[in-house]
Amino acid sequence: MTTTRRHLLRSGGIGAAAVATGALTTAPAQAAAPADSNVTGGNGSHDKGGTAGRPTATVADLLATPSRSLRDGTVAVVAGYRTPGDGGGMTVRWDADSALAPNGGTVLRPKDRPGKGRWRRLHDGVVDFRGFGLFDASVPADDALDAMVEDPAVHRVEAHTDLLFRRRHTYRRSRIVLDFGGRTVHTGGIERNTHDNPFGAVLFFQGAVTGDTVSHVLPAEVIERTDAFPVPDSAAFEVGQWWAVQSDEVAGGGSDERELQKMVEVTEIIDGTHIRVGYLNGWPLAAGRTVTWRRVEPVVGARVDNLVFLGAGQDTGAVDDEYTGSHPVAYEYAVDCDVSGIQATGTFWPVIMRRWCTRYRTVRCGLKNPPTVMYGGAGYLTQQIYCLYGHVADCTSSNVRHLNDLTASAYCQVVNCHGDGDDEGGNPFTTHGQYEHDLLFDGNSGLMDIANSGAQWGNSAKRITVRNHVCSWFTANTKITDLTLENVHVVPRPTFDPAGTLVINADGAQLRGCSASFFAVAQQSARSTRPTTVTDCAFDLPKASVLVQTPVTAPVHFVRTTFTGLDGNLLRGSGPVRFTDCRLVGAPQAAPLVVGASEVTVDGGSLTDTGIALSAVRDQRISVGGGAALSGTNAAKALLSRTAGTAATVTWDLADLRSSAADADTAHVRVTDGRNRYTAVGARLTGGRLSLAADAFTGTSSLLHTACTEEGVTRKGLPADGKRVSAAAGNLIL
């Protein structure tokens, strides 16, 4: 047994460390060691054949041992760094041939400073700042950090005290965990950053870009949602390699407008000119576009956990803050690099900055009170550029620019994150508009806008889903395709947006169970194959607000949706609008809806103290039926009408409706001029008037009013029956 232990101690490996530590630390302090052991004691002696010395008390005691008396492979147990039991204890081994630079923790040189010979710490890959004599934030810990991270035998670095860092560190290191144990990291007096550099973090993990580049013109279209990509020669690629791939700019678009920018892994060589990657492309690429591949060697599995971070800088919001400010973590060309438990205050650049990252988690992080929310790129909790498969969860922010920014990213999720203090317009949730796709936001709160950073990047996004969200402002009215909102509630807030604004793009948008005050449908793109629908929602519209904006040409379908507060609201777009089982509520003195849609359909539901006034700026068709109920009155004294003085042709299809006027002056239908093709079959009208002027039914106009029940209705101005008019017969007049 003695021979075996001596052999292990002299081997100096990880296994030796484990055995030696166990054997030495479990024995009593004065216990005798075997005659052939190799252990130094606290009195600086070296046992050469009799008894073992006592364990060494401190690192200073250890280094006081004359190097000339030490035999190669000697092992010492140190009880503490400065005092026994202070947490900085260690087991070390004398390496007589080592000339490594001493670092105060894992490589120690005796006080007599030999050219060769070092105490090498024996560990199982887990090291601690206390093992470098760091017990508070009174002195910088940068050298110790470098020593531990750059040691390939270390896989976990721990902190058990507050720390001070004054340098910005860049590491190529993979498979390492930095766990700060919830302690505070200070950065006062940190070195200056360079201009516009959000990667100048205290901890910057950066993969390497190799010289391998493949650039080629696409011979045919690359379809959407494919993982098979054409290449000139697949022999240039290997399974398991990582490549940063990007398309050229969109012709005629913004200077940074690209549909494809991701770091992907090669998963299969399909044939001589095709490879498969671990990514389903989100946007089609036309033949003739140029795609460039750059091989990278990413950082893998570098994780940062559990710290309180205090940002440095002038805290004035001045431009100089970009140089003097500090932030904890950045990644570029990184895979499986997670971050958790960072709570930051006063950082200038994003707390967690990522670019060209794939597969990662950012959880339980927060940011409060950055020095500015106005400077672009500053004041973020996390920014992610060209990222894939990210998961951001359980994060919070207060008074920041953005809690979460996803730029040119895909297949990411943001879950249970909450931003407050956003009255300055620093919306917590945003995407840049650089062709993001397939993103999910679930269970969050705070202002939100999507794809709204400007035409330079394309103002485009696709398949964004937002569920269970609460905020006071939400805009998604740029080129956003197939937006899905579920249970999103925009609540007016007097300190920011009293209107409670929700705006969407009519390009496959689908809303379910949402509510807002100001709600509007816009349109800037027409890429989707699915309809734009608004289902089971509720909106309390401000007076005269535009519900459907002028550029909207896509059909918009409202289903079982309630509109209250109606007073002169407008539907200006030319696209068809359909209300199915909806409830529209105005007030007796409020103006009716003004509708410019080429077609408007009311199928069931009710209109109370409001109505529809067709603008007749174009030929229009209105259909009301399915048991729809119209009641009350409005400022125009007409429940269904058209604007006077236009020559457009309006087609009226009225059937299976119930209309009850509140007073004798209110018309169920008022048509006084223009060209009209009117058909009413099976309607039931109660009270009020039916105003169909003869001047509105001349020439090619027509009027058929039959099988209707009129109870207490005053007919006003109806033309006499003739070749194109039939209104006198076939009705029940009560």
Image (spheres, helix red, strand yellow):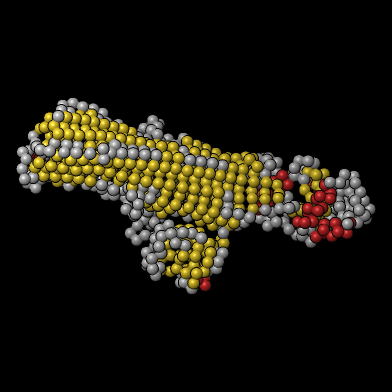
Q: Does residue 700 show up?
A: yes
Residue 472 drawn at (x, y percent)? 40, 36
Rendered residue at 44%/42% (across/down): 467
Rendered residue at 35%/53% (across/down): 528
Judged left or right of residue 132, residue 315 is: left
* Nearest to the observer: residue 541 or residue 705: 705
Rendered residue at 39%/48% (across/down): 483
Residue 717 drawn at (x, y percent)? 8, 34
Residue 265 drawn at (x, y percent)? 53, 62
Position of the C terminus by quadrant: top left
Judged left or right of residue 462, residue 14 is: right
* Nearest to the observer: residue 370 or residue 649: 649
Name the quadrant containing residue 9: bottom right
Q: In this view, does 284 lie above or below 627?
A: below
Q: Does residue 316 show up?
A: no
Judged left or right of residue 513, residue 91 is: right
Judged left or right of residue 668, residue 521 is: right
* Nearest to the observer: residue 287 or residue 333: 287
Residue 341 drawn at (x, y percent)? 59, 42
Name the quadrant containing residue 427: top left
Position of the N terminus by quadrant: bottom right
Name the quadrant containing residue 207: bottom right
